[in-house]
Image (cartoon, rainbow, N blue to C red):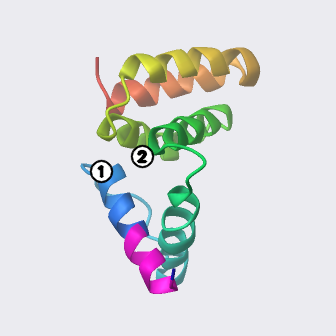
Amino acid sequence: MTDEEKLEKGVALAQRLFEGVSGGTRLPKRFRDYTMSHLFGDVWQGDELELEERELVTSTILVALNRTAEQRLHFTAAKNLGIPRSKIEGMIAHVAHYAGWPCAVSAFGVLNDVWPE
């Protein structure tokens, strides 16, 4: 696959995942293109995991690392992919036991902001 094809696939996937997300961090063009072509156009396109599994893994890591800004994006992506909110809640509760209660409390706050019950 060419770099241009990876970029196109990455942009299409990001649009699907992050539909309804506004604002965000402005990235320099070169870094944005790298993110779209490498991360979303290559890494996220692998056959080893289903798209929903990749989203759950990514969301889990973001909770464990307490990366609330990125959680906003990926909890929205989980919702856009049809992953039930109850799965995200269960994942956060599970992560709490390994990464710490503060990480989980922060994540539930983000989840409630972007995906109200």
Front residue of 44/28: it is: 44
Along the horizontal axis of the image, is 101 left or right of 8? right
Q: Residue at x 55, y 67 (%)?
A: 42
Along the horizontal axis of the image, is 23 left or right of 61? left
Give yes or no for residue 7 being in the magenta stretch: yes
Q: Residues within 10 Å of mark 1 (few under 14, many from 20)?
A: some
Picture coordinates of residue 41, whole percent (x, y): 49, 68
Picture coordinates of residue 94, whole percent (x, y): 63, 16
Look at label 1 and name its amino acid: Val
Asked if disc 1 and disc 2 are in contact, CB closer than 8 Å, the reply is yes
Quadrant assignment, res 38 = bottom right
Give yes or no for residue 83 being in the magenta stretch: no
Quadrant assignment, res 13 = bottom left
Q: Quadrant of the C terminus?
A: top left
Picture coordinates of residue 77, whole percent (x, y): 38, 43
Q: Residues within 10 Å of mark 2 (few under 14, many from 20)?
A: many
Secondary structure under the numbered disc 1 in the rendered image: loop
Look at label 2 and name its amino acid: Leu
Specify whether residue 18 is in view. Answer: no
Front residue of 98/54: it is: 54
In the displayed structure, would residue 25 be above or below residue 56? Answer: below
Q: Residue at x 72, y 14 (%)?
A: 97
Span highlighted in magenta in the image: 2-9
In the displayed structure, would residue 65 be above or below residue 30? Answer: above
Quadrant assignment, res 39 = bottom right
Q: Residue at x 31, y 54 (%)?
A: 16
Q: Earlier in the sequence, mark 1 or mark 2?
A: 1
* Residue under pointer 2: 73
How many discs appear? 2
| Inter-mark Cα distance, 1 to 2 | 7 Å
Magenta stretch prevailing secondary structure: helix
* Residue under pointer 1: 21
